[in-house]
Image: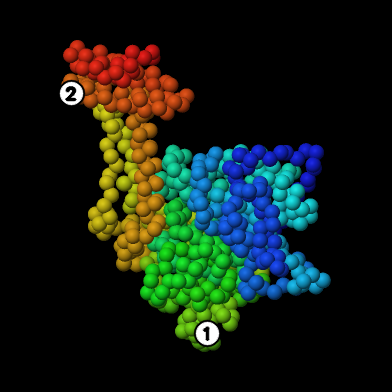
């Protein structure tokens, strides 16, 4: 964010904190300090007492750039914004907003102040927003207000901002929201419900926009996490590798992202996660991962040949190159200094297009204008030395033996705009380029998921069919049968143009990976809810007398039992909308009861619950 919104504090008009409303958005606001005696520590937390001691420790370690990787800047003040994600040691019970998140996000405004008069020549502090939701589009601009304000007026800044946050309406996933902060206004898009971890029951709010595998009708609405990430900016030197990275995350391969600074590695991890929208990402991703994370000891203990868990780790400490040698895919992005080693982007002329890489050659792509024997020798050297060559000099590259199935779409690359060197123009063009890339990968993912569509198809009762019986089950899924059918009919024209002949192997890997089952079960639950809704609507519209005249006695009895079950279910729901439904079902139940023979009526009345239901007032 280039310019921070203005904000002023007026004590006489400051609102008071509503803790329950505040927790709908955030867990706490923290101040972390780098202490010369004790190291990193959480100095204060507001509201107090909401974090476990081990969580405070992990937050403190994750809120500062690694000293060994930080670019030495001798300016008096250096600010940066980044975020991290960690697993909660103890998962809290469902809160007032219905969520029980297993992971927590920390959004950081870090200030390094250089002053020769201080010990070690300066100090560091971080303002941290902790939240159960991945609301980067909200908290990154909020930090641009809260961070400088804290360094101006102190801890009161946290109290004032927390009070304003507690006035916000509840988060509406997939919506554009206007969130006031004093005299400023944040206009933000929240990620859709289908991209967020499920808090238990699946909401029908997901069904319309997320019944992917169908393209959304309004593509301007975000379809996944981190829709505000700068894909083009961070991967400008590796654009041809985006399709490989899309596949790696799709099938759940572990990836190590290394960058010179926390903001750059966070941007890279967020961008990779956003590539597979609208698919729910079930791979554990860590935008900024440090050696102090409790998971590091486990990962560092993996022996050669052992399987690395499906994770995307963003790091800045070069020690990870040696500690995590068993991770199969390493990506180096970013540049230590502004405008250093920037990728000269391909123009639309035929002579300047980006070269496609040879099979298995996973290094930085070079345009024709930059090709030289020296560059070729350097590329061969990088391949031979592997990621450890980053210990001496940072380069943008990818090391991987994975051979992608999907071919880079040169028509998309040729549409991207080379912004030149003007920062203002470059920022504007990045917005355009990000939109082009994001729409392409949304379409790519949606078409990849399209063959699963029949398994999410909800059906309404056909004409003449009683809606009072239970709806039929959805089409059962069998992986081997799915692969066999897909091999016969193909993946569709969109993918056939963009994938190699071994595309079926990508589907096999996807079925075995961590993303498939969670996504499939959740889409399945939404489809089942949708089918129940269609049959519920049909029951409200049905004329029971027309069905009774065409039913044999056994079907009348079955319909009575079904309506009784539906009626009890409506009583248990107990919401206002169910009152009319209950009245309709009660009338239908009495009509069917009246059509039964006397001996059958007596038999049903022997059940006290059924008798009470028939005698209860309508």
- Cβ–Cβ below 8 Å for labels 1 and 2? no
Report whether 54 appears left or right of 110: left
256 left or right of 486 in image: right
Visual colour scheme:
rainbow
* First in residue order: circle 1 vs circle 2: 1
**What's the residue at 42%, 28% (across, down)?**
573
Is 328 placed above or below 162 here?
below
Q: Position of residue 411 (x, y in %)?
A: 47, 64
Where is residue 154? Give x, y as percent. 77, 53
Label 1, residues with CA under 10 Å away: few <14, some 14-19, many ≥20: few
- List the residue tagged with mark 1: 378
Taking 24 as reference, is 435 above or below it? below
Q: Residue at x 76, y 69 (%)?
A: 122
Screen quadrant of the C terminus: top left
What residue is drawn where x is 34% and y is 48%? 453
Residue under the point 55% across and 49% down: 133
Mark 1 residue element: helix
Q: In this rendering, does residue 609 appear at all?
A: yes
Residue 432 image offset from top left, x and y in percent = 58, 58
Depicted 317 relative to depicted 267: above or below: below
Q: Secondary structure at mark 2?
A: helix
Residue under label 2, please give it.
554
Left or right: residue 261 versus residue 615 is right
Q: Position of residue 5 (x, y in %)?
A: 72, 51
Residue 120: name its quadrant. Answer: bottom right
């Amino acid at each position: 964010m280039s310019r921070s919104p203005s904000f002023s504090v007026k004590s006489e008009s400051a609102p008071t904190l509503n803790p329950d409303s505040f927790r709908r958005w955030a867990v706490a606001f923290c101040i972390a300090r780098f202490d010369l005696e004790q190291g990193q520590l959480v100095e204060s937390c507001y509201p107090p007492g909401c974090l476990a001691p081990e969580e405070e420790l992990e937050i403190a370690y994750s809120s500062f750039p690694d000293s060994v990787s930080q670019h030495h800047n001798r300016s008096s003040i250096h600010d940066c914004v980044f975020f991290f994600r960690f697993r909660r040691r103890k998962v809290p019970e469902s809160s007032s907003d219905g969520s029980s998140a297993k992971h927590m996000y920390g959004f950081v405004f870090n200030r390094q102040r250089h002053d020769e008069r201080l010990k070690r020549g300066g100090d560091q502090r971080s303002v941290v927003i902790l939240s159960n939701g991945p609301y980067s589009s909200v908290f990154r601009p909020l930090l641009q207000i809260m961070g400088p304000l804290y360094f101006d007026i102190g801890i009161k800044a946290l109290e004032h901002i927390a009070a304003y946050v507690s006035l916000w309406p509840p988060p509406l996933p997939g919506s554009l929201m206007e969130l006031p902060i004093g005299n400023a206004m944040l206009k933000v898009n929240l990620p859709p419900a289908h991209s967020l971890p499920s808090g238990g029951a699946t909401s029908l709010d997901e069904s319309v926009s997320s019944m992917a595998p169908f393209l959304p009708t309004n593509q301007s609405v975000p379809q996944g996490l981190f829709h505000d990430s700068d894909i083009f900016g961070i991967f400008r030197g590796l654009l041809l590798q985006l399709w490989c990275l899309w596949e790696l995350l799709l099938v759940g391969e572990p990836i190590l992202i290394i960058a010179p600074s926390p903001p750059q590695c966070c941007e890279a991890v967020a961008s990779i996660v956003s590539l597979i929208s609208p698919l729910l990402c079930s791979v554990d991703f860590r935008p900024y991962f440090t050696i102090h994370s409790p998971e590091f000891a486990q990962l560092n203990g993996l022996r050669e040949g052992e399987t690395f868990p499906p994770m995307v780790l963003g790091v800045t400490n070069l020690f990870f190159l040696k500690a995590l040698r068993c991770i199969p895919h390493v990506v180096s992005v970013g540049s230590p200094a502004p405008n250093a080693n920037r990728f000269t982007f391909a123009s639309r002329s035929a002579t300047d297009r980006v070269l496609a890489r040879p099979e298995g050659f996973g290094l930085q792509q070079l345009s024709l204008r930059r090709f030289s024997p020296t560059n070729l020798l350097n590329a061969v050297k990088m391949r031979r030395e592997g990621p450890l060559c980053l210990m001496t000099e940072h380069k943008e590259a990818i090391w991987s033996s994975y051979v992608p199935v999907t071919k880079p779409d040169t028509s998309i690359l040729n549409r991207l705009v080379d912004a030149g060197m003007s920062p203002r123009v470059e920022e504007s063009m990045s917005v355009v380029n990000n939109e082009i890339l994001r729409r392409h990968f949304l379409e790519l993912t949606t078409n990849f998921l399209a063959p699963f569509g029949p398994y999410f198809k909800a059906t309404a009762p056909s004409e003449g069919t009683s809606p009072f019986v239970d709806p039929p089950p959805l089409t059962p899924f069998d992986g081997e049968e799915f692969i066999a059918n897909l091999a016969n009919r193909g993946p569709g024209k969109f993918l056939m143009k963009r994938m190699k002949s071994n595309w079926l192997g990508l589907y096999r890997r996807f079925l075995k990976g961590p993303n498939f089952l969670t996504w499939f079960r959740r889409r399945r639950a939404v489809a089942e809810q949708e089918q129940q809704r269609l049959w519920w609507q049909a029951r409200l519209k049905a004329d029971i007398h027309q069905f009774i005249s065409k039913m044999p006695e056994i079907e009348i009895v079955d319909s009575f039992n079904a309506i009784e079950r539906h009626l009890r279910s409506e009583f248990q729901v107990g919401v206002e909308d169910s009152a009319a439904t209950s009245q309709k079902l009660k009338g239908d139940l009495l009509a069917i009861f009246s059509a039964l023979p006397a001996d059958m009526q007596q038999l049903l009345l022997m059940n006290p619950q059924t008798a009470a239901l028939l005698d209860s007032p309508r």
